Every structure is written in C-alpha cells, then in structure tokens.
Amino acid sequence: MNVAVILAVSLAGGIGAATRLGVDGFVRSRVKTAYPLGTMVINVSGSLLLGVVTGLALTHSLPVEWRLVVGTGFLGGYTTFSTASFETVRLAQQGRFGAALVNGLGMFVAAVAAAGLGLWLGSLPG
C-alpha cells in the first residue's frame, strides 16, 4: 500500500469523525430525547453505506483504494461501536433496562439489516 492511500484513508477517517459529530448534533437539535438516537442513526446509516460499498466492490470492481478510503477511512471514522457500547452501559446504570436493550441489541439488529440491504443495493446490476 502506498503512502498516498494511507494519507487518504487517514484524511477520510477524520472527515468521517467530523461528519459523525455533525450528524449527532443535528439529530440532538431536532429530536429531544434522553435516548442516544444520534448514535443509532449514525451506526445504522454507516452500516447501510458500508454494505453498498462492499456490494459495489464485489460486483462492480470498485478499486481497492476506494474501498479503503470510503470503507475503512470515512465509514470507520463515522461509525462508532465504542460510543454505542458506552451509551448502552450508561442506560443500564440509570436503570433504563428497556432502553439499554433497544440500544444494544436493537442497534445491532438494525445495523446488520441495513448492511444486508446495502449489500443488496450495491450488488444490483449497474
């Protein structure tokens, strides 16, 4: 792997993290809830997009450099497993066990379903 690709992945990761901050702030400003909805939106949409990128890579010969920059870089910076895990624990510590279950298990199920949908969409004939 060349230095340009490594730099592009790094830059894309930073852009993904900044996008995550923006999306979370946008969701929080529009939906007033104690539930971490922004993180769910981010992780489910990121899973959908990664599914699309993977589908394109598998069926339409998306160059490996683009897969790395978009999939590993941007979407790696955009999605956030650690925040989702922390928020699930925080909800459980607050005694909000239903919300913790929805946040942990529900987000996982929704993200896997979104990834499957994205893979299907990315695999459609061009």
Image: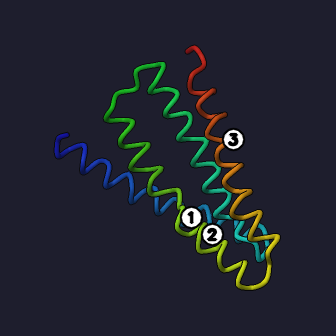
- Residue at image mark 1: 22
Horizontal side of residue 21 vs 106, given as left or right:
left
Expressed as whole percent of the image width and height from the top left, the position of residue 15 reads 42, 57
Q: CA distance from mark 1 to mark 2?
A: 5 Å
Q: Which amino acid is tagged 2? A: Gly
Instruction: State the SS at label 1.
Output: helix
Horizontal side of residue 98 vs 125, given as left or right:
right
Q: Is residue 122 shown above or below 85?
A: above
Residue contact at pointers 1 and 2, CB within 8 angstroms? yes
Q: Which amino acid is tagged 1? A: Gly
Q: CA distance from mark 3 to mark 2?
A: 25 Å
For label 3, the crowd category at 10 Å Cα-Cα, with few meaning under 14, some 14 to 19 and many 20 or more, is some
- Residue at image mark 2: 25
Q: Total marks drawn?
A: 3
Expressed as whole percent of the image width and height from the top left, the position of residue 7 reads 24, 51
Classify residue 61 by image quadrant: top left
What residue do we see at 70% from left, 49% from top?
A: 109
Horizontal side of residue 118 vs 34, given as left or right:
left
Q: Nearer the viewer, residue 112 or 15?
A: 112
What residue do we see at 65% from left, 50% from top?
A: 44
- Residue at image mark 3: 113
Classify residue 124 by image quadrant: top right
Q: Mark 3 or mark 2: which comes first in sequence?
A: 2
Expressed as whole percent of the image width and height from the top left, the position of residue 100 reads 74, 71
